[in-house]
Image (cartoon, rainbow, N blue to C red):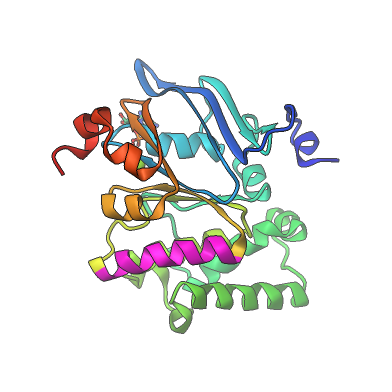
Amino acid sequence: MTQAQADGAIAHPKTPYILEARGVTRRFGGLVAVNNVSFAVQPGEIFGLIGPNGAGKTTFFNLLTGLIQPSSGQMLHNGEEIWRSRPFQIAQRGIARTFQNIRLFGELSALENVMIAHHIHTRSGLVKGVLSLPPAPTEERKTREKAFELLGLVGLGDRASEQAKNFAYGDQRRLEIARALALEPKVLLLDEPAAGMNPNEKGQLSDFIRDIRQQFDLTVLLIEHHVPLVMGLCDRIAVLDFGQLIALGDPTQVKNDPAVIEAYLGAE
Ligand SMILES: Nc1ncnc2c1ncn2[C@@H]1O[C@H](COP(=O)(O)OP(=O)(O)OP(=O)(O)O)[C@@H](O)[C@H]1O
Ligand SMILES: [Mg+2]
């Protein structure tokens, strides 16, 4: 059985895209937060999603990860409809994310925060998690080793036992990335990963995102307000304004688009 059948999803004819939004709309009462947005992401792309505050960027990620439901439209992953998928099913498909408002377990250690995500990835972990049973010892050991490895990758290897709440903002963002990677995703959604990072950390973040794309064969969707980072890193960029897609193209096209300059970039 394919993942689509398992999710009760409708398979669409073969598509070269890893993600595709078709006329995606989400209303909150009278407000249209995401308004008839269509675009497609190719495997391996670093794809930017930018626009002013309140443009609908985070709402789009929330739709994509099953946290909220669409008002209308379609969202496809590898050509399969994922609208009715729940967040854990999205995670099991290999779509992982970080949050603009960091969502770590503050009282738990960095290591435990990453280990929890890895448990979700393993089916037995999920079932046992629901039944509150401990995982098998060998599984536990592997999960722990993997979590240590990921903490090392994000530069937090020597702080594994520290409580997450004691980490500086930038370090918490990196910890969230480690936790997302523990799901062994193929698609990684990053919601403002550079927020709260110092200029030095922001500089390193670009190289880091490129490295993990290579190492884990990832497709990356990136929401970010730090324009130099977005322009330097992304293969293509979609620009939202008041929920609508106002531009889509490579960084040079987007940077010089009058509508984007007017709505977002200003005289910069
Ligand atoms: N759960 C919700 N209920 C009501 N309105 C919401 C909800 N979530 C988002 N909105 C509204 O939808 C619009 C888009 O919000 P969203 O958080 O997606 O913007 P954003 O582009 O991520 O902005 P920012 O750059 O500030 O993070 C805003 O007007 C916001 O107030
Ligand atoms: Mg946002």
x, y percent for residue 130: 69, 53
Q: Between residue 193 and residue 227, name the one nearer to us.
A: 227
Describe residue 232's horizontal placement relative to residue 199 as left or right. Answer: right
Residue 39 vertical placement versus 251 (above, below): above
Q: Tell me the residue at 72%/55% (across/down).
A: 131
Count of number-bearing discs: 0
Which span is picked out in magenta? 200-215
The quadrant of the rendering that contains the C terminus is top left
Q: Position of residue 46 (x, y in %)?
A: 48, 50
Q: Residue 176 or 192: which is nearer the viewer?
A: 192
Query: Which quadrant of the frame does ligand 1 lie within?
Result: top left
Magenta segment main secondary structure: helix
- Residue 174, image quadrant: bottom left
Name the residue at the top extreme.
30
Asked whether, in this view, residue 204 is left or right of residue 46, the answer is left
Query: Quick check: is 263 in the magenta stretch?
Result: no
- Decide whether residue 209 is among the magenta residues: yes
Residue visible at 58% across and 73% down in the picture: 147
Note whether 162 is above or below 122 in the view shown: below
Where the N terminus falls, by quadrant?
top right
The reply to whether residue 91 is in sight is yes
Please identify the residue farthest to the bottom as the structure is shown: 158
Query: Which one is in front, 130 or 210?
Result: 210
* Residue visible at 42% across and 34% down in the picture: 59
Q: Is residue 255 left or right of residue 7?
A: left
Image coordinates of residue 22 in percent, x first then y, are 55, 24
Determine the residue positioned at 62% across, 30% down.
Answer: 83
Residue 14, how many percent across, how many down? 73, 32
